[in-house]
Amino acid sequence: MGKILERSNKELKRFEKIVNSDKALKKVKEGDKLKVGVDLGTSSIVLTVLDENDDIVYGAFEYDHAVQDGIVVNFMESVNILRRLKAKAEKVIGCELKTACGAIPPKTGEKSAKVVANVIEETGMICTGVEDEPTAAAKFLRLKTGTVVDIGGGTTGISIFENGKLTHVIDEATGGFHMTLVLGGRYRIKNEEAEKLKRNKDKEEEVYAVVKPVVEKMAAIVQNMGDEVDDPVIVVGGATNFKEFTKTFSKVLKREVYKPLYPQFVTPLGIAMFDN
C-alpha cells in the first residue's frame, strides 16, 4: 500500500503545482500523442492532459454548478466551461487537443454517458469513451486488488477490484453537495455561501463537526457491502478533503482507510489514461 500512495502522491504533487498555471510540466510538439481526461463534476469541471506514456503534461479546472448528482443539468454551461479549459490548455502546451475521455458515476446509465460524450464533442474533441469514475481512480492508482471509494459532489461511487478485474460497482446519491446542504441548514445560509464555508481551511474543524454525520453515512454505504469490500480501501474525490475524513471512515468500517494527497485530482488523471 505504501508504494501505491508514494508513487501517486508524487504525481499528484507535480500536478497540483501546475494546474491552472501558465506552464506545462513538459514540452510537447504538434503531432505528439496526447491523452485528455474530462471530469464533469458536481462542484467542478477538470481537464487533464497526459502524454502517450501517461506522464502528466498539464491540467485546468473551474468550479461549476452545471452537474447535479453526477448528471449534467446545464448542457451549455458545461460546454462553455470545457471550451475555456480546452483553450487554456492549448495555449499553454502550444498544440490542439483532439480527443478526450469522459466519466460518469457507476450505473448512471447510457443516457448520462451520451450527454458527457456530447459535451466533449461540442468543444471539437472526439470522445473516445466514457468510463465509471472509481474505475478511473483505480487506473491512476495502479490498484489491482482493493476498494476505491470515489466521493464527488453528488455521489459516492464504490468499485471493488480483484487481481485487476472489476468485481463489484455501486453508486449512491450522497456526496459533497449533501455536506453543503447540511451546512446551509445549520447556519441558515445559501448553498453558495455554504460551499465557500466548506472549503474554508480556517474553519475546517468547525465545519467538519457539522458534516461528520454525512461522512458517517458515506462510510455506512461501504460497510453495507459487507464481505465484498477488499483491502486496501482508498477514498478519493474533492469531498474527502478534510483532515479527519479517513479517521471517521476507519472507525465506521473498523479497518484502515487511505487517502492520497489532493484526492480531487485522482479521478480526472485516471480518466485521461483511458483516452486511446
Image: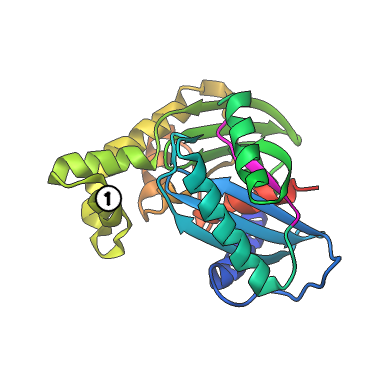
Asked whether residue 9 appears in the rendered view, the answer is no
Residue 102 locus on image (x, y percent): 64, 43
Label 1 Cα neighbours within 10 Å, binned few <14 / some 14-19 / many ≥20: few
Relative placement, left or right, of 251 versus 225 is left
Magenta-colored segment: predominant secondary structure:
strand
Based on the picture, tell me whether residue 62 belongs to the magenta stretch.
no
Question: Residue at the location (61% across, 70% down)?
Answer: 14
- Quadrant in the rendering for residue 200: bottom left
Asked whether residue 152 appears in the rendered view, the answer is yes
Q: Is residue 10 above or below residue 164?
A: below
**Mark 1, residue position:** 192
Relative placement, left or right, of 245 versus 210 is right
**Residue most toward the left?**
188
Question: Residue at the location (42% across, 41% down)?
Answer: 250
- Quadrant in the rendering for residue 25: bottom right
In the image, 156 versus 64, the foreground residue is 64
Magenta extent: 98-107
Question: Residue at the location (37% across, 53% down)?
Answer: 242
Residue 35 locus on image (x, y percent): 75, 55
Q: Which amino acid does the dot numbered 1 rest on?
A: Glu
